[in-house]
Image: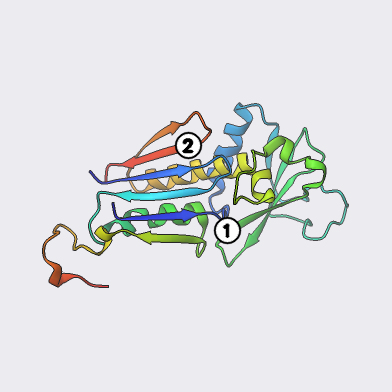
Amino acid sequence: MSHTTSITDIVFSDIEALTAAVAELRSKGVAITLEKGGTPRAYFTNQTGMGEAAYVLRLATSKYDVGLYRNAEKGGYEARTDLFMGEVARVLGVTQTKGVSIERAALGKLYQTYAVHAATRQAIKKGYTVNRINAPDGTVKLVVGGM
Amino acid sequence: MKQIVITITPDGTSTVDAQGFKGKGCADASEQIEIALGGVGTKKKVKKPEYFAPAGSSTNKNKLTF
């Protein structure tokens, strides 16, 4: 073994991976669509930090959406949403575990599915093979080989 | 056998574990995957002893570079 890297802060830098993630979530019954541009719905019409977004993830069964906003420092887009009344968490959330923020858990399904597709796409781009294992506890393991 | 095992928890927290490498080859192999997962400057890396071993040899300690 050589090194281990923990990544706790997801930024969306691969829109094709995001598109694939949305497709996977839809196949699992999540009513979500990806739109380029637009304004995500929030409690207030002109909610601070929730104006015109680069991309909007529309949640048909929620009152609110998720907006993706450019974060040049991190080299991608960061997700912003309105967590009021658990509207978004009801659709995209996972059980909050120790050390995980409410905000993170509320968008867990989105973050995990995106991470799976982003890592898979990047590995394949480098010519590697990827074996995906879905564990019973909800964790996904990607075994990357062929290097 | 060289491989990279990526573990992604239900909340999207990812751990990238480069296995079977010697030297900095692991960094070359996994860096783009790490960036794809977490952008730039958002990761915590723990180097294992093998990281500091010369690639292709585990005996020539004189060639160690840091």
Q: In this view, does A138 lie above or below A112?
A: above
Helix, strand or loop for disc 2: strand
Residue linked to disc 2: A140
Nearer the observer, A41 or B25: B25
The residue shown at (50%, 54%) is A7
Residue linked to disc 1: A76
Nearer the observer, A63 or A17: A63
Distance (Cα) linking label 1 and label 2: 23 Å
Q: What residue type is labelled 1?
A: Gly
Q: Is residue B49 above or below residue B64?
A: above
The percent coordinates of residue A137 (x first, y second) are 52, 32
Q: Can residue B24 be seen in this view?
A: no
Q: Quadrant of residue A132?
A: top left
Helix, strand or loop for disc 1: strand
Q: Which amino acid does label 2 sit on?
A: Val
Nearer the observer, A16 or B28: B28
Estimate how packed mark 1 is, as few (under 14), some (14 to 19) or many (20 or more) residues with alpha carbons within 10 Å. many
Q: Mark 1, chain letter?
A: A
Q: In this view, does A12 lie above or below A70?
A: above
